[in-house]
Amino acid sequence: MTVWLCRAGLDGQYEDKFIDQEKVFLIGSVSIDLTGKTDMTELMKLVSTKYPTEPDGSVVTMSSQARAFATKVKAGDLVVLPSGGEDRLLSIGEVTGAYQYDGSKSEFKHSHTVEWKHGTWKRKQFDPDIVRSVDAFDSFMLFFKLRQEKRIREIIGTTEPFAITITRKKREAMAKQAEEDLKAARENKAKRKAEAVDDVQKQLAAERAEEAALRKKQEKVQREAAARLAKAEKDKENALKKEMAAEKAEADALRKKQEKAQKEAAARLAKAEKDKEAALKKELADERAEEKALRAKQEKAQKEAAARLAKADGAKKTEGAPDTAEKDAEVKRALEALKAAEAKAAEEKALREKAQADAAAKAEEVKRALDALKAAEAKAAEVKPAEAEAKAAAAPEAAGTVIKNIYITRCCCGDDDAWDYDILKERRRFRR
């Protein structure tokens, strides 16, 4: 079978028409029906008569192309169609019909039907000499035979084309198939949507049923929790009432105990104050007696010294001047002893006066401390029970029992068995 090259115009401008109509046309040829025109001489005469202004070379070219297209192309031959533009691809088809002539058309009078079943190829997929043959005579030859038939058939039989040539029928078929596929897809989508809606409805129904069951369970749990909470609150309230009653009773007992302890402390404090006052009076009486005895002793010593002095003076007058030095020394000693006795008496008197003043100041301080202690205890006795009751009423859960110990002891300060009122003032305790 022969391989023909057929151009879709000198610039490939009719390529789409060739592909869409699945035909090859002899563009720009003679307007003569070439059916059965096999004789070249006769055909040249017809062309020369038809186109008298054409030169002989053009007549030969037109006649040879027309004769080959009309009489030598057979079914099964291959047709190579160069594309226009920059891509310069090659579409290869197979002739399927005999020569046809349509005088009503201007450019497309001569045609053969073709099936573009061998696809579209790039030029670099063929050998360089085949490409040169394809590009030969591109300025004036629109149809001619390619001599590399065998190699062209080997290449298209063993190599994949660059692309499939899409004809109008294929496009229509593809469009129809795409439409059918789209329709089927829409039907499937609608079907899936309906099924999905059914599934969703079933799922919603199941979820509603599950939600209703869960809501009933939650309501039951809430009722049980409310009942338990009410019972717990009631039990807690009863326990709190019992605890408050016990705390109140304990507070009353403690208050009574505190009052009793305060009374006993006040009694002991009054007794201690009375004892202290008696001790002070006794101490003052003893000091006065001691002072009186000392004063009497001093007076006696003075009298004795005066008597000795008078005696010495009398003896001096009666006896004259013997032993004058010894007597003067005795008189001097007596006078010194008298002065020393008077100085000691004055010092003892100052010490007694200082001791009396200190005792009076201490007694006054003790009295003030006792008065302050009594006032503080009275105030504490009034405030603390009220504070305990208010605290228990404000925070019954945190209320507790307050235990206060009162220690009452005596404190011995030296040998006078006196009370340590400084300790009583600072710590409100008595120590022995």
Image: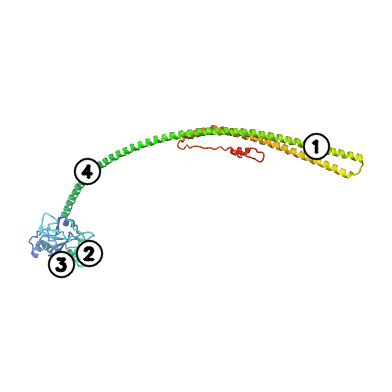
Q: Which element is circle 1 on?
A: helix
Q: Name the residue under label 4.
A: 198
- Which quarter of the figure is the C terminus placed in? top right
Q: Which element is circle 2 on?
A: helix
Report whether residue 147 is seen.
no
**Residue 51 image position (x, y, % from top left):** 12, 60
Q: Which element is circle 3 on?
A: helix
Q: How far apart are marks 1 and 2 (CA)?
A: 166 Å
Q: Name the residue under label 2.
A: 124
Earlier sequence position, callout 4 versus callout 2: 2
Whether tag 4 and tag 3 are in contact, CB under 8 A, the answer is: no
Three-letter amino acid code of the residue under disc 4? Asp
Q: Quick check: 336 left or right of 363?
A: right
Instruction: Point out the frontmost of discs 1 and 3.
Output: 1
Q: Mark 1 points at which residue?
A: 300
The residue that appears at 22% across and 43% down in the rendered structure is: 198
Q: How far apart are marks 1 and 3 (CA)?
A: 181 Å
Q: How far apart are marks 2 and 3 (CA)?
A: 18 Å
Whether tag 1 and tag 2 are in contact, CB under 8 A, the answer is: no
Of residue 355 and residue 84, the one placed in the foreground of this image is 355
Instruction: Point out the frontmost of discs 4 and 1.
Output: 1
Three-letter amino acid code of the residue under disc 3? Lys
